[in-house]
Amino acid sequence: MPEPDMREQRTRADGPHDQAEAALADCVEAAIAAPSIHNSQPWRFRIRDGGIDVFADWARRLEVIDPTGRELLISVGAAVYNLRLAVHQQGREPVLHLLPDPSHPDLVARVEPGQQATPHESLIVLAAAIPRRHTNRRPFARMVVPASVLEELAAAAQAEGAILSVADPVGRNAILSLVHTADQRLRTQGIYRAELTEWTTPAHSRLDGVPPKAFGPWDAMEALPLRDFGLTQPQLRRSRENFEPYPTIVVLSTQGDAAEHWLRAGQALQRVLLTATVSGLASTPMSQPLEIPELRQLVTDTAAGRWAQVILRLGYGQPTTPTPRRPLTEVLLTDPPNDRHG
């Protein structure tokens, strides 16, 4: 007889303590479905004292395009938002502590189930969208995203302390030009190509990185500068398709540019992405300019204290397949990790 899987074992927990830990483990399952840069999944979790500690896994940082760890912490922030949603779904008010212990900088957040609370219907809907949210690098339909939907996305970002700005036609063209420039600069760097290869090399049992099925097709008109995940694997056959000529481009910004702001940007990003999923929208990150400091300054309004954190392409696309995720056994710790810093 086959061994029961972890989820099945959790449902058999007998005592109240075991049941509480099983419920928290289910929340971690939701967290690991979050998006991350190059699907690097740079997070680890620990269930302790009735709550969940969230650790940044610095060994999974992309050193070339993310030397400061900004995108890593945005990724972890997205996982934190899923944790909060999952706690809501279990009928408890999540209590969030960001950067709770300065002596342990790898511990970037702690989420605790607070008092009992009936989850709002809107949050139930967002939680249900977690398994349906996938990055889509395929062409989108030539349809305008309604202003009312964009307003909902902006409100989602604002609820998490971020700003979502929709680029007008002039701004869209300027941003796409910056993305193209950034992409060209990056692909000429051998260290960038090596890093890209590290996270895109297919393997039968691989549960992280970007698999070939998620690369997306070539843009036949070469007008939309999506990141080319097949850059160093020319042997892979990919179709050529026509992408939408006037994509909807949005920029997610925060009032500040430190670790706390990056974690909040990740939570805002995930809330925006889940809201978009509920509205039937697909999304693609196009943040290459933000990985080159002098180009990031052109998207950032420092006079207003706004720092660009994520650039997204939005639209209506065909369903796409999910990228793999590491199992709970690989990311759930029984002991605290050794801090990389401090």
Image (spheres, helix red, strand yellow):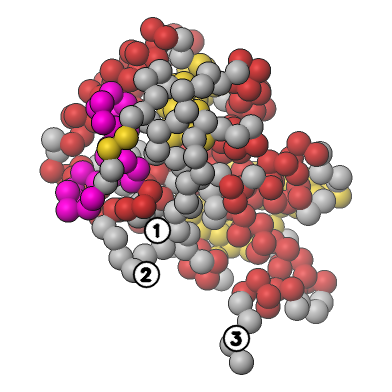
Residue 208, numbered circle: 1
Span highlighted in magenta in the image: 215-237
- Name the residue type under label 2: Ser
Q: CA distance from mark 1 to mark 3?
A: 25 Å
What residue is at 51 percent from the left and 22 percent from the top?
Answer: 143
Residue 198 appears in view: yes
Nearer to us in this view, 118 or 314: 314
> Residue 1: percent from the left, percent from the top?
61, 92
What residue is at 22 percent from the left and 53 percent from the top?
Answer: 236
Q: Which callout, 3 or 2, points at the residue further toward the start of the chain? A: 3
Mark 2 Cα shell of 10 Å, populated few (<14), some (14-19), many (≥20): few
Nearer to us in this view, 115 or 253: 253
Q: On the picture, is 340 further left or further right than 189?
A: right
Mark 1 Cα shell of 10 Å, populated few (<14), some (14-19), many (≥20): some
Q: Which callout, 1 or 3, points at the residue further toward the start of the chain? A: 3
Q: CA distance from mark 3 to mark 2?
A: 20 Å
Q: Nearer the viewer, mark 2 or mark 1?
A: 2
Vertical comparison of 325 with 274: above or below? below
Residue, disc 2: 205
Residues at badges 2 and 1 in contact (C-beta under 8 Å)?
no
